[in-house]
Image (tube, rainbow, N blue to C red):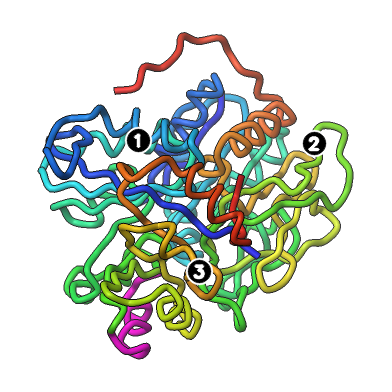
Amino acid sequence: MITLVELPLEGLQPLEGALAQLGRPHLRASRPSQAAPEGAILLRGSGSFEAGCVALKESGWWFELPQMLASGRPVLGLGLGFHLLAEGSEACPRGAGLALLPGIARSLGPGVRLPHRGWARVERCREHPRIPDPRGAWMFFDHAEALDPGGPTLLAAHHGRPIAVMDLQGICVGVQADPCRSGAFGLGFLDRLLECLGEAPQARPPEALN
Amino acid sequence: MDAKRIVPILVVREGRVVDPATGAALGTPSLWARRLEWQGADELLFLASEGRLDWITSVARNVAIPFTVEAPAGPAALLALGADRVLLPTADLGRLRATELGRSRVLASADASLSREALEEAARDGAGELLLQAPGQTPAWIGEHCARLAISALLRSSDPLGDGEALAHGLEGIAYPAALGAPTSFKKALGALGVPLRG
């Protein structure tokens, strides 16, 4: 079962809706003790990098996430969650991230409007047997900092400069675009990514719209 | 280059999408959101005038494109219900402490005739983007005005094809009443003008 890290002031509804549509059982956990006994951990993150670090430390996730990863549980960071898994962010020069992924999130500016909010094309940087080539598919972005593409980068986009869209190192993954807001392609991408991380869908009845 | 955005506007009363002219109920916000998503909308804007807001959570769970909400409730409450972003008047950004919400969560409405300095002040007050109204202005004027702004802007338009020329300049998108037509129809016509669009 997938565990969604629940931080203060964070709206998990888009992620929960996407996981429900994809047939992925999941639960929210504001503290590590509430996490599912096994399965992937999803860290979405919203607000500022500094506030995210403080929230992770105060809740205990800061200390548990590295141990969970080391024990073999996949960890997926989305958006700000990607930056929190990395070494740090220029948005908070005195702080540091979890360093579970290499790199520092750098400001996209100057020279471009901030935040970067819109649909950008995503391209493949290197092949992966289970992550298909997006072939310029559109994904939705909403951020002011981003990691530079590097060794772990599978997918990249461009906004003023090249930006890492998906970094993969073992079973730790960071994704800059919002797959829950990137249309049908985004949901399919999240579906494939979760399968890669060992989270298989379960059959469930359709969820009625109300 | 990012795609320019086509943003249908829906009016919600008592938890139902309504025809703004007649007030007739047209269906649930979730149903309309999914329909417009399938029809190529890049984002959605909901304008709600009533207190019932549980539909926001349903939309958040069931739509795979971003959406913004204007409603008679505190912005933090709307975001907690699942809205990706809130629409606030530029004049109220300070009073509503928009800087505490995060610029990505705030769309500020403003008159395009304001000075560049006044419009960019919205960014300092917490807005990540502007929704401009520009009655009587030509698309060329709108586009050139937006091109000089350090903050990105959408145009609230009742003539998305007529105002489409502004997308070729600095405007990032057009928000229009959904009743005017499906996004695909506007995208087809605007794409023929060379506007970079998704889909």
Q: Main secondary structure of the magenta part?
A: helix
Q: Nearer the viewer, residue A69 or B162?
A: B162
Query: Which element carries disc 1, helix, strand or loop?
Result: helix
Q: Is residue B146 visible?
A: yes
Q: Nearer the viewer, residue A62 or B76?
A: B76
How crowded pointer 2 is (Cα within 10 Å; few <14, some 14-19, many 20+) is rated as few
Q: Amino acid at mark 1?
A: Val
Q: Label 1 near label 2: C-beta < 8 Å?
A: no
The residue to which callout 3 is attached is A115
In which quarter of the view is residue B85 placed? Answer: bottom left
Query: Which element carries disc 2, helix, strand or loop?
Result: loop
Q: Is residue B148 above or below residue B85?
A: below
**What is the spatial separation of the Cα atoms under label 3 and label 2, in whole angstroms?**
28 Å
Q: Nearer the viewer, residue A77 or A15?
A: A15
Label 3 chain ID: A
Label 1 chain ID: B
Q: Amino acid at mark 2?
A: Pro
The residue to which callout 2 is attached is A132
The residue lying at 60 percent from left, 83 percent from top is A110
Q: Is residue A8 visible?
A: no
Image quadrant in which the C terminus of chain A is located: top left
- Horizontally, residue A171 falls left or right of residue A182, namely right
Q: Which residues are magenta?
A: B114-128
Query: Which element carries disc 3, helix, strand or loop?
Result: loop
The residue to which callout 1 is attached is B59
**What is the spatial separation of the Cα atoms under label 1 and label 3, in whole angstroms?**
24 Å
- Horizontally, residue A188 falls left or right of residue B190, namely right
The residue lying at 10 percent from left, 43 percent from top is B51
Where residue B128 appears, as percent x and y from the top left, is 41, 69
How crowded pointer 3 is (Cα within 10 Å; few <14, some 14-19, many 20+) is rated as many
The residue lying at 45 percent from left, 13 percent from top is A206
